[in-house]
Image (tube, grey):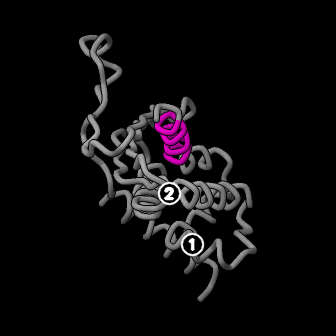
Amino acid sequence: MSSDDFEQMYQEVILDASKNPHGKEQFALDVTSESSATAETGVQANHEYCTPGESHQFNPTCGDQVTVHVEVSDSEPRRIERLVWDGSGCSISTASLSMMVDLVDGKTVEEAMQLESAFQQLMQSRGAGLDDADEKEALGDAVVFQGVSKYPMRIKCALLGWAGLKDSLAKALAAS
């Protein structure tokens, strides 16, 4: 398979994930609306044994925005019991969010942060990808973002949801 064939396959995977996003729920208020400016946003924890955390992220260069809601178990090891998001953005940010949900939902916080770190490294590779075979395997379909890492303006789109995950996890852990 030529590099052009791989690039086309990667684009198809990203487009498919953006058209059929996993973990997307409608819960965040429209922050552009005046009537919602004073209202509270968010979802309630579904489980009494979980601590919720929520983070709103905005990419000013393209207008992508997302609110990530996570629920972390109160028992050790701390586990992501629920991960949902709401927002709007380009196919890259939507696909990245969808794949992120698939990768980290049900994982321990430590495992999720290892995946976030591997994805960060992938995005910093400038198209070279990851050297570590275990990290590549752990990222699964998300390795398709290797092509995105060649374009600095698009990297922010791919990382938007991951930044929301990291921040919402920190908030949930701080609140427990």
SS under mark 1: helix
Chain part drawn in magenta = 160-173
Q: Is residue 107 visible from the viewing direction of this image?
A: yes
Answer few, some or many: residues within 10 Å of disc 2's Cα (few below 14, many 20 plus, some between 14 and 19).
Answer: few
Distance Cα–Cα, label 1 vs label 2: 20 Å
The residue located at (43%, 70%) in the rendering is 12
- Residue 88, quarter of the rendered image: top left
Q: Where is residue 4 in the image (x, y as percent from the top left)?
A: 59, 77
Query: Is 174 or 76 nearer to us in this picture?
Result: 76
Q: Residue furthest bottom?
A: 1
| Residue 52 image offset from top left, x and y in percent | 38, 38
Q: Name the residue under label 2.
A: 77
Q: Position of residue 164 (x, y in %)?
A: 50, 40
Residue topped by disc 1: 138
Amino acid at circle 1? Ala
| 169 in the magenta segment | yes
Nearer to the camera, 98 or 169: 169
Is residue 30 located in the magenta-colored stretch of the structure? no
Is residue 58 something that shows in the picture?
Answer: no
Q: Which residue is drawn at 34% across and 51% down?
A: 82
Left or right: where 30 falls relative to 12: left
Q: In the figure, residue 61 lies in which quadrant?
A: top right
Task: Say which amino acid is labelled 2.
Answer: Pro
> In the image, what residue occupies the spot 40% across and 61% down?
106
The N terminus: image quadrant: bottom right
Q: Is the magenta stretch mostly helix, strand or loop?
A: helix
**Counting residues from the N terminus, which is met first, the one under dot 1 or under dot 2?**
2
